[in-house]
Each structure stands twice: as structure tokens, then as C-alpha cells.
Image: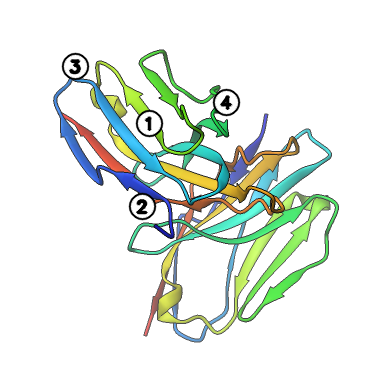
Amino acid sequence: AQKVTQAQTEISVVEKEDVTLDCVYETRDTTYYLFWYKQPPSGELVFLIRRNSFDEQNEISGRYSWNFQKSTSSFNFTITASQVVDSAVYFCALSEAGGYNKLIFGAGTRLAVHP
Amino acid sequence: GAGVSQSPRYKVTKRGQDVALRCDPISGHVSLYWYRQALGQGPEFLTYFNYEAQQDKSGLPNDRFSAERPEGSISTLTIQRTEQRDSAMYRCASSWHRGGTNTGELFFGEGSRLTVL
């Protein structure tokens, strides 16, 4: 069975601190996809990234970076120099290969960035 | 519109009533998904369409839940004989523009918050 675990329920940091959100997944598939979504206080879900299981290269996009390690079944998300606008709930998700996006979401991590 | 549009945004109903939630996906998107999100939880998959065909309904909790997308565009999620446990945010998402590449990105609507009294 597929499962995504985000062990950190809430994280609170002060602006400009770096913060890492953990994501651990379980799947029996050899081909799968991993995602991160952001849910700001306004409530919408915003796509951040998708990685496939064959691409373990780390990804950097501005202040955001992602570390994918198959050996530990983890896909962690780091925000460098956090800002108040980063305050949101962040969801990690997993989908199996099959041509569609039946995402299994984790419970989310609520990040609060204080000035 | 430019994004995924859902209506109503808020629905309060009494136990036992039927409700219909509507989703208008991004124009030209092939795939349409319904998810349900309970408070403090991540979204949970309900069902999925490619064009008008319902490809997977394995996430629908029971036979009181049904969905359709008759013309391959707008979709309706119907809950019959609502129960208090059906209270949640129901989110629609669409993806994959016809003729384009499926990047895997889901575009979510703002959701319909259902409260069953």
C-alpha cells in the first residue's frame, strides 16, 4: 500500500531562518512520482514540484530546494531564508505510475514564519 | 475563467438531503479529479475522469457518492442522503491540456465546503 508520512505537524521559525520539511513515503512500485503542494491561508492548493522515481538529482528553485533519497524513501523540502509569505500548510504527495495523478497526500506540515 | 471554478463555495444542508457540487475545469483540460479534504488532513482521492469517461472511482466512500462529466468538461459530484460524516472540503482539480504534455501538475479549485447538520 502507498503511504506518505509528514511527521512534523507544525513548525515555527523566525524570518530568515532555514527550515526543512520532512516527507517519508512507502510504495511497492518501482516507478512513481513525488509532489509538494503549498496551501496558503487563503486555502487553495498550489503545485510546487513533481519528481519521478528515476531522477534523484536534487532540485533548486530560488529559495526552495528538494532532496530526494530513494535509499531512505524521503523527499524533503528546504526553504532557505524563510519569509512571512512562506507561512502555509505544505503537503507531500505520491502517485504510482499509470498515466494519471491519483495522489496520496500526507497530512501536511503547517509552517509559521514570524517576523 | 482562467482557473478551476467550483460552486457552491459553501453549502450547509440537513442530514438526509441530497447535494450536488459543481466543477468547471480549466478550458481544454482532459483530466478532472475530485478530492475530499477533512480539517487538518491532506486531500483524499475520490474519483477521476479523462474526457467524459470515469476512469477510476475507487475513492468514492460508498454508493451514496457519484460523479459525472457528461460532455467532458463540467463535472458534478452528487452526495445522496447526506450524513454528518460527509462534512468536508470537496476539491476539484484538472490537468493536462489537450494536445500538450502531461506534466503531472494538478490545478485545484478553491473547493466547496460542505457542512451537514
Residue placed under numbered mark 3 in the picture: B16
Can residue B19 be seen here? The reply is: yes
Residue placed under numbered mark 2 in the picture: B110
Instruction: Residue B29 in the image: state x and y as whole percent.
Output: 56, 47
CA–CA distance in space, label 3 to label 2: 26 Å
Q: Element type at marker 3?
A: loop
CA–CA distance in space, label 1 to label 4: 13 Å
Instruction: Residue B87 in the image: state x and y as whole percent.
Output: 27, 33
The residue positioned farthest toward the top in the image shown: B63
Residue in front for this viewpoint, A112 or B22: B22
Residue placed under numbered mark 4 in the picture: B53
How many residues crowd around disc 1 within 10 Å: few (fewer than 14), some, or many (20 or more)?
A: many
Instruction: Residue A47 in the image: state x and y as whole percent.
Output: 55, 59
Amino acid at the residue labelled 1: Thr
Residue in front for this viewpoint, A18 or B93: B93
CA–CA distance in space, label 1 to label 2: 15 Å
